[in-house]
Amino acid sequence: MRGRGETQGMNSREYIEQAEQDLLHTYNRYPVVLDRGEGVYLYDREGKKYLDFCAGIAVFALGYQNREYNDALKSQIDKVIHTSNYYYNVPAIEAARKLKAVSGMDRVFFTNSGAEAVEGALKAARKYAYLKDGSTDHEIIAMEHSFHGRTMGALAVTGTPKYREAFEPLIGNIRFARLNDMDSVREQLSEKTCAVILETVQGEGGLVPARETFLRELRELCDKRDILLILDEIQCGMGRTGYLFAWQKYNVKPDIMTTAKALGCGVPVGAFLMTEKVGKSSLAAGDHGTTYGGNPLACAAVEKVLDLFERNHIIENVRETAPYLEQRLEELAARHGDILERRGAGLMQGLVFAHPVGEIIGRALEKGLILISAGANIIRFVPPLIITRENIDEMVSILDTCID
């Protein structure tokens, strides 16, 4: 076993070999060892430059080396990184206040990840139903092709069988309907239904937005039957669609909402939020908890991210650049017959191909462009939210040659 000093002089190939010996192989990683970032670019150990249209899977909204963000974290590190939830801390209070203000929700619970936020949302929904009738057999409707996380509860409501099969039985009483199909929702509805959960824009499932009519009908149904509407904004939230949260475009407010990824712009943090109605009639002291969730360092990141989104006009930049990205992707699709469709919302876009896209993504990486897929045949574009038209032109120029 090598110590820290013994690995300092290793090249990328040696680091990769070491990683394959030490890390559990749950990822098929690309053969690149990333070392640092600047703006919308990343650099590997050898100094090669990459235009990043992945942003750590929709995480690094502010780009790399934002000085104010870095300084806020350094300042908090010099104060205190962690206490526990037995005590209050100022960054958590300020972050919750600001998050409530921009979301219009009433109560916040900070987690360490998006999957944990989904777990908390599911528990809150079941506790809300339990307090109404004392029953423990309530059902939740989720959507086919959805993705909510890898933990057991989040996996149970993930609507892609290949993710679930090896780990069943998961939590029970989950039914699956089709996104944007109210008839299929009604088919799954029963007297035991306590919640409906969906991504406002499906990410892994293919960059498919929920339609306004669907969301409005779903909200009306939930209101009529006192069913909780849970919207997963983990990937599509935090400005990515041109609204801080995607549901705000249609003003279809959820009862519970999950967020993570760009909430901390690199620091692991998530949250689930709820209305006062749910907050006062669901989780109580002792029902839920977390050791690290809401610690001062993570919440200092959240607080600074929300400040910088407003001060640096991040959402305005998304609204300005997203139509241009759509235009350039449409032009790309028109030039290549194997591109079947462009879809998505804001800076959360996808190109649907007639074949698997792994080789194209690999060629792009060789040429200095970082892309990811959504399923086998879709290239996903989720860049930092600070990108410019020039960055989009550079991306399209590289990708064009890779498709050829």
Image (cartoon, grey):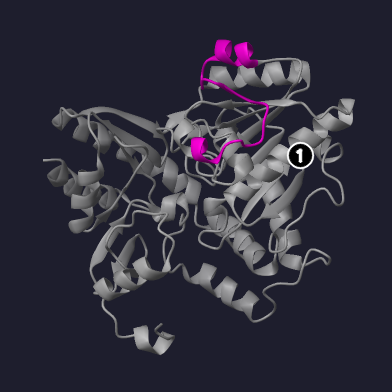
Indicate the quadrant containing the C terminus: top left, top right, bottom left or bottom right.
top left
Is 156 on the left or on the right of 388, as rendered? right
Task: Please tell me which residue is depicted at 83% across the width and 38% down the height of the picture.
Answer: 282
Magenta region, residue range = 164-188
The percent coordinates of residue 57 (x first, y second) are: 43, 51
Task: Please tell me which residue is depicted at 85% across the width and 52% down the height of the picture.
Answer: 286
Is 126 on the left or on the right of 230, as rendered? right
Task: Please tell me which residue is depicted at 75% across the width and 72% down the height of the picture.
Answer: 83
- Determine which residue is flagged by label 1: 124
Task: Please tell me which residue is depicted at 55% across the width and 74% down the height of the picture.
Answer: 71
Which element type, helix, strand or loop, lies under badge 1?
helix
The percent coordinates of residue 378 (x first, y second) are: 31, 36
Residue 300 higher or lower than 6, as above or below = above
- For the question of whether residue 36 can be seen, the reply is no
Locate residue 305: give its quadrant: bottom right
Q: Residue furthest bottom?
A: 5
The percent coordinates of residue 344 (x first, y second) are: 40, 33
The percent coordinates of residue 241 (x first, y second) are: 47, 39
Locate residue 360: give its quadrant: top left
Residue 258 higher or lower than 49, as above or below = above
Residue 379 higher or lower than 95, as above or below = above
